[in-house]
Amino acid sequence: MTKVTLVLGTAREERNSEPVALYLKTLFEAHEDVELTYVDVREHVHAPVTIPPWGAGGTDEKATPWQEIASATDTFVFVLPEYNHGYPGEWKLLIDSLYKEYEGKLAYTVGVSTGIFGGARVIDHVKQVFVELKMIPKRTALYVGKVEEVFKEETPTDEGFIERAEKFVDAVSQKA
């Protein structure tokens, strides 16, 4: 069984990417060969984080919940809104708190935006971070543009998005 960690990478109030992440969560849970862990960055960035070896405290810090999750994960799926052509600061704090736990693990990205490009810039930017962390960035991505139109309340209403999301989850589940 493959261990997939789905990460909602923003802590903002009324975040538009949350319905996307929760919808993907239900799709992943339908795959019997996937063991899913759902991570909301809000639950981790205010908790103590592991200090990287180049920071104060060294590597002998007590393991954190995020470190335990990352160590046990085979594949990461990051749901990231595009903020000012980049990624959320909370996600960067979380991802930068570890290093060796990511090596060789698959990394997929879901870009979310209110504009028409569906988070294309954030998807492009995070690939550099994945490479630096020795993760394996995958070309398969999900772009969610005009998210406020795609989701009404917490339910997707756009048939095209629903089809793309199902294909994305199937592809991740098969390659994971």
Image: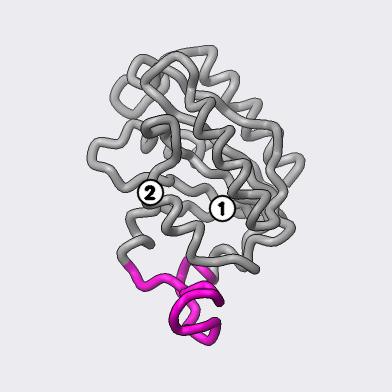
Residue 10 placement, left or right of 104 = left
Quick one: label 1, few (<14), some, or many (20+) residues within 10 Å? many
Q: In this view, does 28 lie above or below 40?
A: above
Q: Which mark is residue 113?
A: none
Which kind of residue does numbered mark 2 sit on? Gly
Measured as percent of width and height from the top left, residue 120 is found at 53, 25
- Badge 2 marks a residue whose secondary structure is helix
Please state which amino acid type lies under the numbered disc 1: Thr
Colouring scheme, one of rainbow, by chain, secondary structure, one colour: one colour
> Is the magenta region chiefly helix, strand or loop?
loop
Marks 2 and 1 sit apart, C-alpha to C-alpha, by 19 Å
**Residue at the (62%, 41%) spot, across then down:** 127
Judging by the rendered image, the residue that carries numbered circle 1 is: 5
**Numbered range of the magenta stretch:** 47-67
Point 68% across, 31% down: residue: 140
Kindly identify which numbered label has been placed on residue 89. 2
Residue 94 vs residue 73, the one in the foreground: 94
